[in-house]
Image (spheres, rainbow, N blue to C red):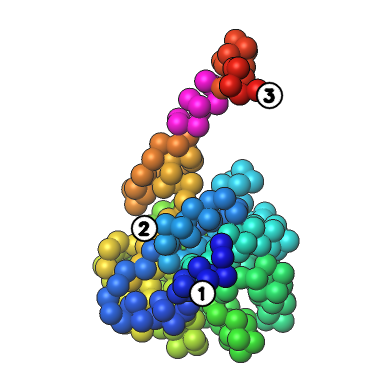
Amino acid sequence: MSENKYKEITRVTTHVLQEMKERGEIISMLTAYDYSMAKILDDAKIDVILVGDSASNVMAGHMTTLPITLDQMIYHASSVIRAVYRALVVVDLPFGSYQGNSKEALNSAIRIMKEAGAHAIKMEGGTEIMESIKRILSAGIPVMGHLGLTPQSIYKFGTFEVRAREEAEAAKLISDAEALAEAGCFAIVLEKIPAKLAEQVAKKVKVPVIGIGAGSGVDGQVLVLHDLLGITKQFSPRFLRRYMNLYDGILDAVSSYIEDVKLKDFPNEKEQY
Ligand code: KIV
């Protein structure tokens, strides 16, 4: 891309997202973990790219998001950053990189910003991680919150069921969201909670609320790219809309290639020197 083209692109910043909420423009967000996919997303003009710790499932084949390391997140994030000219790139702090204490949390956030060149970080949890959130924010690093179903706590929850159906958990979620916004988080992800509750939170807090399985009454939507493209087949929650069936498409293409190679149909005359 030429320097002039770069200058023409208006980058999505945390301030742009805030303005979008204020004028009622819905925010689009998707995950990406590598250069090639991030480039397509950025060309499509996605607003936010999340280098999610779902890379642990999607890219590495783990059952949960717990095993992915800070070094691995930095590797994924730096690949994404090299592709992106427009979108805001947010990177998950992985499990174990911030729960210990606020100094460790700040060091992890600094590594992601410095080594990957990320624009912001995301952390799962409410008031229980507030000290770390405040310390990271005070270093000038934008923080996105994440409440509701927080996959890093899956062994505490025990299931991937909808969260905050009960009054007490819903009340805690509302007060956590208010505390995150008050502390200075620039946005909050709400995962797998009742649509009415998510809408209530989006109305209550001033910062953008991005939903995944949280209905349409919020300020933006996020999905895992590989789920939307139909590359992952084993995961079919009700909230997921698949826009492609790429698993079968790739399977067909690879099977055709294997057949052509075996039959010596590939390469043909025109495909050689
Ligand atoms: O890691 C991830 O992909 C996420 C989204 C599900 C929001 O946190």
Residue type (three-letter) at the residue carrying disc 2: Gly
- Give the class, few, some or many, for how many residues have Cα within 10 Å of label 2's Cα (few <14, many ≥20): many
Whether residue 28 sits left or right of residue 254 in the image: it is: left
Query: What whole-number distance in Å separates the C-alpha atoms at marks 3 and 1?
Result: 41 Å
Q: Which mark is residue 7?
A: 1
Q: Residue at x 30, y 72 (%)?
A: 25
Between 120 and 158, the one lying in front of the other is: 120
Residue type (three-letter) at the residue carrying disc 3: Tyr
Q: Which residue is mark 3?
A: 273
Q: Is mark 3 within 8 Å of ligand 1?
A: no
Majority SS type along the magenta span = helix
> Regarding mark 1 in the picture, which secondary structure is present there?
helix
Query: What whole-number distance in Å separates the C-alpha atoms at marks 2 and 1?
Result: 36 Å
- Rendering coords of residue 231 (x, y %): 48, 40
- Rendering coords of residue 17 (x, y %): 40, 76
Does the magenta-highlighted stretch encompass residue 107? no
Between 220 and 42, the one lying in front of the other is: 42
Can residue 101 be seen from the camera position used here? no
Can residue 47 be seen from the camera position used here? yes
Residue positioned most to the top: 263
Q: Which mark is residue 213?
A: 2
Q: Which residues are magenta?
A: 248-256
**Above or below — where is 178 with respect to 146?**
below
> Regarding mark 3 in the picture, which secondary structure is present there?
loop
Q: Is mark 1 within 8 Å of ligand 1?
A: no
